[in-house]
Image: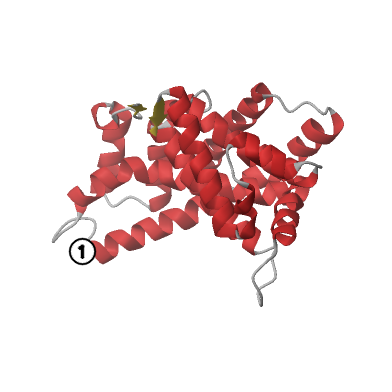
Amino acid sequence: MGHIRLGTLPQSKKWRDVIQLLESSAPLENVAEAAARASELDLRRASDDPTFQFVAQLLVKLPLLARAPGFEAALSELGVKRSALDSVSGLLAGLNDAITQHNFDNGRSSDAGEMGRAALLESLSVQMRGQLPTLFEPTPQEIRKALASFASGQNFAVLARDFFARLSYRSLDYYLSRELANHTGVGKRFADDAARVEFSRALSQHTFEASRIVEEFAGGWYGKTVWKEQSLSQDKINDFTRYAFKKMRSELGRRRTSV
């Protein structure tokens, strides 16, 4: 099975700009915006990647499937066993297997798809657990109800923000992690590994704060597309992810100029 990798940024002028910012100890906001600008084309193409499209489809459609009759049958069509609803971890494992099977059926995987997969599973894990009882193990009915809760515009917006925050951080880290080691040591930007880890932690927080822009429009998009127009085609989902990437890139740029 083939694997599609993202571009090799170190050869581009935009990536050299990122390196110069790291060498000059520029503020994190500047580094994040420059890295986002350098990776913009690859992220724009992610919306056309079959694996990422499948992940985005799960993000948008799973809450609706959980809310509608025949949820177990719908999961089976995705390749997820009905027993997956016995626990949150079981559901996540089932979705992970479904994505793997999708890659196998298409004969390839991709970096964009794998980052999307990780972001989706992490977001569902965190956001669903926030909707579930904490004293006892949730029942399959409670797990389904928690997932279905994201079929409202407001709750979907929260889930979408979490997803794109994690995805944006992973995409920036995908490129930056290759370079940060070259700037760690005595007399360099990061005195030691602890300083480099702190930079990564701050970058994660920065992308989460920037992702607020996604939350602001995702709920309205969901309500209009799902409930008003009742038109949730793959093209509509692709347009949504493209716009989310565009807004994240714009917000990272705005935050740089406001520093």
Crowding at label 1, few (<14), some or many (≥20) Cα neighbours within 10 Å?
A: some
Residue 110 at least partly seen: yes
Residue 220, image x and y in percent?
A: 77, 39
Using the image, determine if residue 206 lies above or below residue 164: below
Name the residue nearer the viewer: 236 or 27: 236
Residue at the spot 82% in from the left edge and 29% down from the top edge: 230
Q: What element carries label 1?
A: loop
Name the side, left or right, on which 227 lies relative to 222.
right
Name the residue nearer the viewer: 137 or 181: 137
Using the image, determine if residue 58 lies above or below residue 93: above
Quadrant for residue 187, please give it: bottom left
Residue at the spot 50% in from the left edge and 47% down from the top edge: 119
Q: Which residue lies furthest to the bottom in this view?
A: 135
Quadrant for residue 108, please give it: top left
Residue 146, image x and y in percent?
A: 72, 57
Name the side, left or right, on which 134 lies relative to 69.
left
Residue type indicated by callout 1: Asp
For disc 1, the marked residue is 192
Using the image, determine if residue 186 lies above or below residue 17: below
Residue at the spot 80% in from the left edge and 42% down from the top edge: 68
Name the side, left or right, on which 239 lies relative to 6.
right
Residue 218 at least partly seen: no
Image quadrant holding the N terminus, namely top left
Name the residue nearer the viewer: 31 or 258: 31
Residue 106, image x and y in percent?
A: 46, 23
Using the image, determine if residue 195 lies above or below residue 114: below
Residue at the spot 71% in from the left edge and 39% down from the top edge: 73
Residue 243, image x and y in percent?
A: 61, 31
